[in-house]
Image (cartoon, coloured by chain):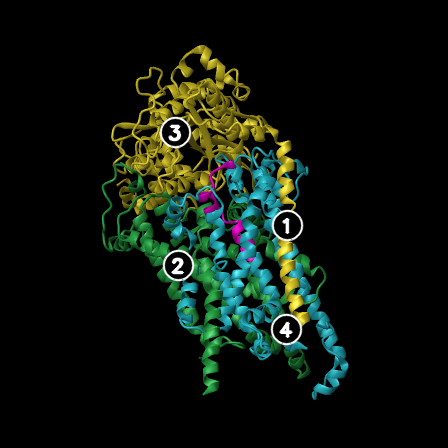
Amino acid sequence: MKTKKLLALLLCAMMVSALFACAQPAAPATEAPAAEATEAAAAETTEAPPAEKVTLTFSLWGDPAEQEVTQKTLDVYNNSQDKVYVQALQIGRDEYNEKLQTMATAGEMPDCGMVAEDTVIGWAKDGLLMDIDIYAGQENLPLDYLAFKYDGKTVAYSAANEVLALWYNKAMFDAAGIPYPPTSLDQAWTWDQFVEVAKQLTIDANGKHPGDAGFNKDNIVQYGAYVNQYTWQLEVWALSNGGSFFSPDGKSVVFDDAAIEAIQKVVDLHLVDNVAPLNDGTQDNGFTSSIGAGNVAMCTEGQWATGFRGAGFDGIDYGVAVLPYMKEKVTIATGGPTGVFATTKHPQEAADFLRWYNSEENGMNTIMAGWWMPTKQNYYTDETLLKSWVDDCAFRAALPADAYKTAIVDVALDTNVTHQSAWYYTPNMFDVIRTLQPAMVEAINGSKTVKEVIDSVRDAMQANLG
Amino acid sequence: MKNKTKRTNNACKEQRAAYLFLIPALLGLTLITYIPLLAVFGISLTDLNVGHFIKGGTMPPVQFVGFQNFREIFQNPNIDFLNSIKVTVVFALLAVVCSIVYSMLIAMLLNRKMPARGFFRAVFYIPYILPAASVMISWWFLLKYDGGLINYILVNLGLGKSYFLSAANTAIPSLAMIAVWTSGNLIVIFLAGLQNVPRVYHEAAEIDGANAWQRFWNITIPCMTPIIFYNLLMSLVVNLQVVVPALAVTKGGPGKSTMFMTYLMYQIGFRGRELGQAGAIAFVFFIVAAILAFILFATSKSWIYNEGGDDQK
Amino acid sequence: MNESAVQPSRVKKGSLKRYSFKSKKRSEKIADTLSLLIIIFMAALVMLPLWWMVRSSLMKSIEIFKWPPQFFPSEWLFSNYNIKPTTFDFWRYLGNTLTIVVPCVVFGTITAIFCGYAFARLRFKGKTFLFSLCVGSMLLPTMVTLIPLYIAWASLGLTDTYWPLILPYLCGGGAFNIFLIRQFIKTLPRELDESAAIDGAGYMRTLVSIIIPSIGPAIIVVALLIFISTWNDLLQQTIYISSREKYTMAVGLTTFMGSFKNDYAGMFAATCLSFLPGVIVYLFGQRYFVEGIVMTGMKN
């Protein structure tokens, strides 16, 4: 009996000590690297806010590179004045809405922060966003299309501007002896020209192109084109073909024949033309898994693709061009918005901070890293200002800068060409995407036509719009 | 007479000891599970939205709507809850059956003497340790239609490519396969169970000339039934609650083939803000899970071999 | 205890049938080899996705997508693991996570043993009802009760602390684990604790001296399960933890993944790092049930 008891005790002791043994090295270890990471430690020690200041919490997502830049930006703001202290609340992109909405149920939302593009209008409608125009009474305003409007009132502005463009791998064009894609609108390729070039750039393991005898579509080593199939990006092709997704007031679903035809052409790049890899729009990350992967010659992506030069893709030399068109030369714009949350006790301070944060002078780091474009009109029209973020930015200069100016800057300024993405004016875009995106996969893999898919979800999307 | 009082005294003592042992669980069950569950049921009878929590907000006041949310989730084709129940149950059953067979087989093999046994056990267990979302992203890379390793192997073996997660009819089997891959915890529990099968039984049977299959069927399986039952139940419950694959990769598609119940609830209540509808979905989910668990319990009486059981009162 | 299960002397005594020791040995050998081959094959299959993560963490991001797929990095970039603490503060996350995990595992396991024992062996009023409640609580995903619970914790002022993540585990360590312990105790013969009762042992003593030593592997399993479930509990950790200095491994990892997901190699490296402690704890724990700490009194 005694030995058993002893064994039992020993066992328990072993278990507990085993766990604590595992825990032990952690304690000193936490201190050791903390000493190494003096930057981080320093940032934290300065964080204790003086009592008399108003403390604001600013929530954001973003990859670590961005977060580091953000922290520096906040430090600048905190040191620039002595009334307000802003602290960052970083949340993973995938958990962002859940966290903020849960916080809202306990009245604990941050004072201000980024808002997911597809839920801005929904949050405004349900009262999570404060009805405050951070640029009220200001002169230098962002480009018109960067304002999120609900019920005719502006509820949030994008902190950045992004337009879609065509990106291409220079080496692949050189190897095929094909001239680079056009960089100005007046020379833009038609869709058929685009497909034709894509065919020449698509190569299977035996060096054959689509249409050649013996071409093996299951063993393609280089694809000609990759058109991003995120639901919101597909809208550009509907517009290009003279169709549309929604009515201009955002209240009804259109998805006319022109829109359906356009999307069918996009999915046919894979299904019929065999120039594109299958891309079901769920996890795909346009640029990264196409040009960045080094096996696609051209892809469509937002301006942020410029930033990939600084993110490990420097081995690939890529350029920018204008999107091909079907009937009309168009692109769409978007940009991560910021807003003041309804539970804040300091709406004015929060609005002042956001205006400061959204201004180019203070957000230059992200602009120069290639991820963002400025939002204010004068940064596109004033020669000196334009030079400061295009010619003087190494990543843009490498595209090169002239191509960037015609393919991106001129396009972004031309409001006949650049349209707002639907989520600037459509309520419940999140719900619409939730309905449409999974359904679209069945068109993308060819088991249904785009028309069949759209007809099957048309009523549901209309219900989503509310 | 004296004997009887002694017995009741003992029973009293036993009962008191039991309640003392159960204090932590009872606290947890009431405070962390059932009171919040009642709250959720209450919410499901209202049109509560996250916006209602904003003081001075723009939402009209909360209304009691009776069972309208329940009607809504079943009748609104946009929500299509029946489809969600169907795909969830189909997925769960497929995943449960495959993982139980797989993990029992692996555990039996790993229980034999072999070189590097510890290493192999670790190999089969590690998939369970990994963060589920990272696992899904890894698998997504492997299962991609164009550029995925698995399709590369299939093509080189002369077999055709498969769409895996990108087609409605292959998505559920693919996810079930991933669930099987992740079922290392079942293997460990089976292994622990196999350790508990008294070796004397095997020895005796061997001496009686029983072959391996007979020993497996007549000794191992009966001794393991409580453990098999536990693994069945746990695997059923975990797989009914499946949400990460949809969250991380499939987003409910292709079509509605992976619009699992929990994911639908997540979409409506967490990414969306309709807490009332989400509450209704949660409640129906609870009932569906309870029915399946009840069926499992009801049938278990006939096949669980209960050596130390006391259920015969 | 003895590995050479079949002792010739016992065979002679116990077996009436013809018993060929040699052929038995040979067939055992074939079975052993066969099962080893199957295990190697299956292990290779299971390892494939794991290897894919590891090899992806050691190459350049662009190489990850290469066609045909590369089994090995062209250049082994261990430098991918050298992630700046400002972006992925491994040691801090490890310390924080262990602050949550260790009490959960220790007290969760102990309370699970208490409750499992009561349900398996003791007779008391309302047992069936309480047990049904216990099983019922397993059927609920955490997501269901998250909002009411959050409101409750917030009203106690305990958000952005670890208490909402730890305290629930002090209450029985979760119904799954109570249930697991109960099932294992049920596989034990009743005579075992009855003999202890005859010796005049109380319930606590029976539990500690008889039951616990007999279900050693199960206890290790429960500890491992609690470890893993608290380690990977991303949803609750994200909801409750806000300050950067309180980040856990799971929260740190998901924040690291960021919005553009451009740094795939770094993402895989961080993922591999994040599960490394889990692997180590597993390897430590498995020693105990690989050795087989089965000390059932019946066997002697």
**Numbered disc 2: what chain?**
B
- On screen, residue A142 above or below B202: above
Q: Which mark is residue C81?
A: none
Front of the two marks 2 and 3: 2
Specify the chain shown as green.
B
Q: Name the residue under label 2.
A: B30
**Residue B182 visible from this viewpoint:** no
Work out whether disc 2 and disc 4 sit on a shared chain.
no
Q: Mark 3 points at which residue?
A: A338
Chain A is shown in which shade? yellow
Q: Which mark is residue A22?
A: 1
Front of the two marks 2 and 4: 2
- On screen, residue A310 above or below B101: above
**Residue C255 visible from this viewpoint:** yes
Of C154 and C181, the residue lying toward us: C154
Report how far apart the C-alphas of labels 4 and 3 lie in the structure. Answer: 64 Å
- Mark 1 neighbour class, 10 Å CA radius: few under 14, some 14 to 19, many 20 or more: some
The span shown in magenta is C225-244
Q: Do tag 4 and tag 3 residues touch (Cβ < 8 Å)?
A: no
Which amino acid type is marked by label 4?
Thr
Q: Mark 4 points at which residue?
A: C296
Chain C is shown in which shade? cyan
